[in-house]
Amino acid sequence: MTVRVRFAPSPTGHLHVGNVRTALFNWLYARKQDGTVILRIEDTDLERSTIESEQMIFQDMEWLGLDWDEGPDKGGEFGPYRQSERQEIYAAHAQQLLDEGKAYYCFCTPEELEAERVKAAAENRPPKYNRKCLSLTEAEVNEKLASGIPASIRFKTPDNETVFWYDIVKGKTEIPTDVIGDQIIVRASGVPRYNFAVVIDDHLMEISHIVRGDDHVPNTPLQLLIFRAFGWEEPKFAHLSMIVGEDHARLSKRHGATSVNQFREQGYLHEAFINYLALLGWSPGEGEEKLQVDKLIEKFSLKKVNSSPAVFDVKKLNWLNAGYIHELDDEKLANLLIPVLQDGGFLPGELTKSIKTWMIQYASAVKTNLVTINDVLNEFKLLTEFEPSAIESGSEEYTIITEEGVGKLIGQLQDEIGEIPPVDKDKYREMMGSLMSKAERKGKKLFHPIRIAVTGRLSGMELDFLIPLLETGSKLDLPVKILPLDERLNRIRKHFFK
Ligand code: GLU
């Protein structure tokens, strides 16, 4: 079977976690089956749809590496791929249903319909159209149309039937037609409703599998009835469960970032984000969680998608992101860190060769301390912020730096720096070796006071990375200066040992 799937966003803003997970599952399925991915823009809601949003969707998809084979920008045999450009197609199909007596014109005014709804609510009935216009004669209909009375088109839903389908995710799903009623498929303005346009498109675009959020389950029976009314083959359906926050409420802004661009701006890597999204409702099994996209494709199966709600777990996303950052090549990581540090005012707009080289060393050193790329803004302060007076008395740092003999140790360290400037790891080791024998200290007794003396803090990256970075970084022309080692030690001495 030729697999053709579609991702059909409405262009009303950036992609959200829910619809991007839908896009991903469509994409993984199609790529696994050597199928075709269609990007269709569902812009029949003319007031809310914008071309800027369409661009944002393209950008979000591109950032994630989710490509498509047919779409408004790519073309294809089954276009146009924007619903707003398919009006004539919908009109012709609506006419066909009218001609076959499977749909009918409705001239009821919004006020009449509203009054009906209120009445139904008062009588505890479901708000279903009362079929007033179904009984109009052909002559009456023609007369009303000729006199220009606004007319919508309603689909004639068969009574007392049950529509069911075998959902790949949810299993057999059934809904009685009585709850559906005769719904409007084309508005009086001539604009088709979603439930109609989607069926025409899915058929004409030869979609084999509809993979979408389970908020569309209530729409599926009407769509199936429309497929059947035309005598068209029905696609297969896979409805993905919703994504909830840790409190099990539907994921919303309240839970933090929810749109793809927010995650990108917060410094998540697309590899990690894709990997994480794939785990929302699906599992590769055998306790595996960290998988690159080619492995995801290899292992993906729609049949194994879980039908219960998927909990969005930021901790797991963070864990994956840290893992992917850790594996990045130093230069690649540096290239991701540089723009963030430039925006933060820590690096100049134009980088000299020596700054670039230094940044690669820095990337290598900071790698294991980052959960997101943006964490570098905080980590970098270890190099640029240094204030001995901020070491509060009573703190562990204070206790260590004021211990007996530390003043002397700092003097000895300064002598060593004079002789062996620690510009790289080897020089650093040489210097520390020499200091160790002169100061007769080792382990924590040596490293803790030194760490505090050069950074003011007890935590941070390994000293064998940090100390050379401070020494070489201080020689660079940066907007926020990195204090050289010697200057730091002078300040510490002045503050604590004068
Ligand atoms: N445009 C619809 C949405 O944004 C998608 C409809 C569908 O997948 O059938 O939810």
Image: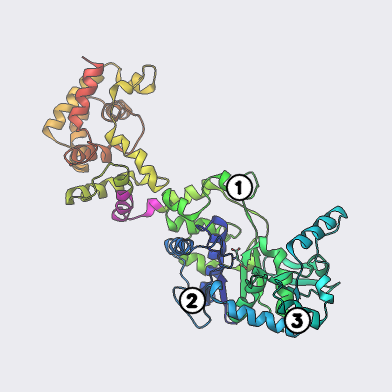
Label 2 – label 1 distance at C-alpha:
34 Å
Which dot, 3 or 1, sits closer to the camera?
Answer: 3
From the image, tell me which residue sits under label 2: 70
Residue beneath the point at 41% across and 47% down? 372
Q: So how many labels did they put on this image? A: 3
First in sequence: mark 3 vs mark 1: 3
Q: Which residue carries the number 1 mark?
A: 245
Can you give x and y, in whole percent of width and height, for residue 99 in the image? 74, 85
Is residue 287 in view? no
> In which quadrant of the rendered view does residue 278 lie?
bottom right
Helix, strand or loop under label 3 = helix
Amino acid on which disc 3 is placed: Asn
The mark nearer the N terminus, 2 or 1, is 2
Between discs 3 and 2, the one toward the N terminus: 2
Q: Nearer the viewer, residue 161 or 245?
A: 161
Q: Is residue 338 magenta?
A: yes
Could you tell me the amino acid type at mark 2?
Glu
Which quadrant, please, contains the N terminus? bottom right
Residue at mark 1: C-beta within 8 A of ligand 1: no
> What amino acid does circle 1 point to?
Gly
> Spatial distance from mark 3 to mark 2, Cα to Cα?
41 Å
385 or 467, nearer to the observer: 385
Q: Nearer the viewer, mark 3 or mark 2?
A: 3
Range of the magenta residues?
325-339
Residue 492, how many percent across, how many down?
24, 22
Which is more toward the observer, 396 or 498? 498
Residue at point 51%, 58% (across, down)? 15
Task: Report the disc number at residue 142.
Answer: 3
Ligand 1 picture quarter: bottom right
